[in-house]
Image: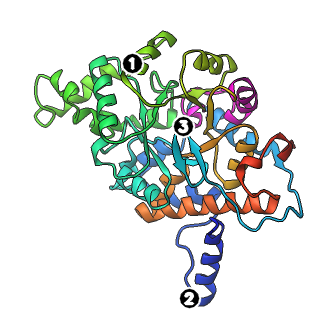
């Protein structure tokens, strides 16, 4: 059985025998700087910065540095098995593509390229409601759908029906974006891509959305945008409304944006199947708790009842190993993939994913683990 870490040997062989070196860095921490030369100022301003002062985003990264892996020796394992099944979805590794909206800011192919890259590696792609390409355009064998819950229930129901008809297996409901966070980098530029129609493909192609317009989208796109703007802010959601989703979605439901133990318990009480411990990569609430700081207590509280997933601040395979040790069943990777997308489209996303998986695989190998399921609290210590 091949190991993901073999990608490292492939790179060395190409370099030494063919004189071919990677055009995109293998240092995932340097991707942002490399992509900066490719992305427009507006795209960089939207993708990179976070809410307010950026304190939450910085806290996400710093939280990983407060934990250290404890390698074990002489454990006698030459191959690793990273495969797993998450909410009925078989995966080659505990890594999913996070839902990322308006990916055409990074590359014209946007979500199409990212989904193809995920498919090439057998990974699960999560499609954002705010995507630049509609549900039906996404080609990936394993795909989940992320819902931004609109105020219009007709549109919400239509989204659920289209996602199910298009083969999306799990519904991921983002709770932390009832409205857009205060983001000075975008505000200073007066830039919000959705207001020029970018990232609204799912809406503009939706029959329930179209039925509420006086004119077709093509005839009055500005009116269509403003109609979207009226239904996107949805800060008034309550826990009781989850019954609407359960009544209209027959697959697993995951709530994304949980950082409080009490909310994790409420999720379990309301019958959902999983949660994503996440603060939206620091893009919503400035000065919020780092996702990794929230993870252990949440995993302890509901890990036996719910599938606990994790995102926000994950940059490396070592980061993933720490999150898995602290109670996550899998991690979702976001921003680094956008940087790879900006640099080389589908090939760039594939390279970033292969590097990430290689580092996770090699981290496990060098720490004495045959699979990620062996990771536990004894695998890490506080720095």
User: What residue range appears in magenta?
Assistant: 277-303
Residue sitting at x 55%, y 50%: 91
* 3D distance between C-alphas at marks 3 and 2: 43 Å
| Residue 292 painted magenta | yes
Q: Secondary structure at mark 1?
A: helix
Which is in the foreground here, disc 1 or disc 2? 1
Dot 3 lies on which element?
A: loop
CB under 8 Å between discs 1 and 2: no
Could you classify mark 3 by the number of other residues whose Cα lies within 10 Å: few (under 14), some (14-19), or many (20 or more)?
some
Residue 87 is marked as 3
Q: Is residue 306 left or right of residue 377?
A: left
Residue for badge 2: 18
Q: Which part of the image, by quadrant, shows the N terminus?
A: bottom right
* Quarter assignment of residue 301: top right
Left or right: 280, with 153 as reference point: right
Mark 1 / mark 2, whichever is N-terminal: 2
């Amino acid at each position: 059985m091949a190991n993901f870490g073999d990608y490292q040997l492939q790179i060395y062989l190409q370099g030494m025998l063919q004189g071919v070196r990677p055009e995109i860095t293998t240092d995932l921490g340097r991707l942002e700087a490399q992509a900066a030369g490719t992305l427009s100022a507006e795209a960089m301003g939207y993708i990179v910065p976070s809410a307010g002062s950026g304190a939450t985003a910085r806290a996400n990264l710093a939280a990983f540095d407060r934990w250290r892996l404890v390698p074990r020796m002489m454990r006698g394992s030459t191959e690793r098995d990273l495969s797993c099944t998450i909410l009925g979805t078989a995966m080659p590794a505990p890594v999913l593509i996070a839902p990322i909206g308006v990916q055409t800011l990074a590359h014209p192919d946007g979500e199409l390229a990212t989904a193809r890259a995920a498919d090439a590696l057998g990974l699960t792609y999560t499609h954002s409601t705010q995507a630049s390409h509609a549900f039906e355009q996404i080609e990936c064998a394993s795909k989940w759908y992320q819902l931004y819950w609109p105020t219009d229930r007709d549109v919400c129901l239509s989204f659920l029906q289209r996602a199910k008809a298009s083969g999306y297996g799990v519904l991921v409901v983002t709770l932390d974006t009832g409205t857009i966070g205060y983001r000075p980098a975008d505000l200073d530029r007066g830039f919000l891509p959705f207001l020029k129609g970018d990232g609204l493909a799912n809406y503009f192609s939706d029959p329930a959305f179209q039925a509420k317009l006086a004119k077709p989208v093509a005839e009055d796109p500005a009116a269509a945008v403003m109609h979207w703007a009226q239904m996107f802010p949805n800060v008034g959601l309550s826990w009781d409304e989850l019954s609407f989703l359960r009544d209209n979605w027959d697959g697993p439901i995951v709530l994304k944006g949980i950082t409080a133990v009490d909310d994790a318990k409420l999720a379990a009480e309301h019958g959902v199947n999983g949660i994503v411990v996440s603060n939206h990569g620091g893009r919503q609430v400035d000065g919020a708790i780092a996702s990794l700081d929230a993870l252990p207590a949440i995993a302890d509280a509901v890990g036996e009842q719910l599938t606990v997933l994790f995102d926000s601040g994950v940059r490396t395979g070592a980061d993933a190993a720490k999150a898995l040790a602290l109670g996550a069943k899998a991690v979702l990777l976001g921003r680094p993939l956008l940087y790879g997308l900006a640099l080389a489209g589908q090939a760039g996303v594939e390279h970033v994913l292969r590097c990430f998986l290689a580092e996770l695989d090699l981290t496990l190998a060098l720490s004495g683990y045959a699979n990620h399921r062996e990771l536990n609290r004894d695998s890490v210590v506080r720095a």
